[in-house]
Image: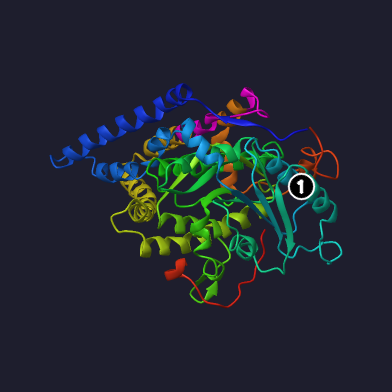
Amino acid sequence: MRPPTATFVGLRARTLLAAAPLVFFVVWTTTHLVSVTNVFSASTNQLAFAWLISFLLLWWVPLAWFERPFRATADQQHELDQLTVTVQIPVYNEDEAALRACLRSVLDQSRPVDRIRVVDDGSMDPASGRGQTYRRVRRSFLAEAAARGVEASWDRTENRGKRWAQMHVLAHDDADIFVTLDSDSVLDAHAVREGLKPFADPGVKSVAGLVAVLNTRANVLTRMICLLYLPFTRGLRSAQSVLRRVTINSGTLAFYRADVIRRHAGVYENETFRGRPMQMNDDSMLTMYALLEGDTVHQPSAIVFTLAPERLRHYIRQQMRWMRGTTVRHFWWLRYMPVTGVVFVTTVAEYLHIALSVLIPVALVVGAAREDRLGEVLLITLVIALVMHYLMALRLFTLRRSDDTWRFTVGLFVLSPPRRSLAGRGASPDVPVRARHLLADQLVGDPGLGGGQGLGRVAARCAPAGGSVG
């Protein structure tokens, strides 16, 4: 069985989907602007101003609907076709079948890449404790790449972390565009072609791909993750792209002008925070380098499928790692981004929104209890929360997948509030789980590849940083 294919829906479908959230936000904002005016005329709605600010801080929900895939003219496409493209894949303790699927998807691109650089960051066989060589995968991959005229390399290094694995080859590679790809991810057949199109604009320095969950049907948790990823992967990031200020490219799939990355070789690997090496959040650091030199955008038609955690403890560990790294990155944004710029302002707004999300409910409950209207207020709050949730979940329908039926997508949308509630409480760790290699084995049939149809200013200390690619 081949990997799924996907397309970002057209303008007419997006316009129909966008109508509800855009109308809702206009009505809500107008209503509370009127309420704010009435506050100064002794209105009883003393929280109107806080409500208004709180919803304005959700600016990205309506703005995300204005995102469009980047296109290229015939002349621009000809220039893009001349670019030398290197795909870098760091590997650490990856399942062999998943790795085969990843490599196969790169070789099968409609716009062939020029180089594929695989770096094994000291993988170990968990059963024996010995080095994992991937001998059969490596031999088959190198042979097929050579047959297709693609320059390929496979290096093994000591385990120092994903950044070191990346820069082991990228620091001296003379390509025009670098593509970073995780080893547990599978590219849509046109991902590279689409991901290059924004570079027709010389001001664009990096491009984020659209990330979709590959193992959607593995269990209840992976279905929930499809929804939990939405607010960022197809919400905030899309809105930031409209402003050309994407702050975090997913390491799953990202494109960079190669000179931006080469200029920070030796610094990127050695980033520290409060004297400690930073190996997490490598993707946001690369995006920050690009932000300092130009525009950073999202290309919703450059699609990659990634394996989501199938066990609750793995998902929690992943989220905690991301949150720690993003919190550190907030300090960098506040320190190095222009005070009047989009990144600085939205970072401050994010913390303001967090504060209001605590203060407003407390004020509502206290006020309602005093006026004996607690039940009414809680009901209204629940209705508003459900409406907001469904407006955000509409982004599900912006991607058409070959492996998802219309019924499955609609069902996921309808049942999304209880699923997200379950995620908040914690899903049962006893939910049946399919091993990653079983899923990946559906994507490739045989054991080989031929299967089934600091910123310089922020960063560096020179002490080596430990860690793993995973």
The magenta stretch spans residue 380? no
Q: Please state, as top left, top right, bottom left or bottom right, where the N terminus lies in the image.
A: top right
Question: Camera-side residue: 299 or 51?
Answer: 299
Residue 259 position, x and y percent, is 50, 57
Residue 427 position, x and y percent, is 65, 46
Q: Which region shows up in magenta?
A: 391-408
Secondary structure state at the residue bearing disc 1:
helix
Residue at 32% x, 58% y: name it: 338
Q: Is residue 303 left or right of residue 369?
A: right
Location of residue 450 (image quadrant): top right
Residue 117 position, x and y percent, is 68, 55
> Pointer 1: what residue?
146
Location of residue 37 (image quadrant): top left
Q: Is residue 80 left or right of residue 35?
A: right
Q: Is residue 125 visible?
A: yes
Residue 43 position, x and y percent, is 18, 39
Q: Is residue 153 left or right of residue 130?
A: left
Other-residue count near label 1 (Cα within 10 Å), few / some / many at <14 / 14–19 / ≥20: few
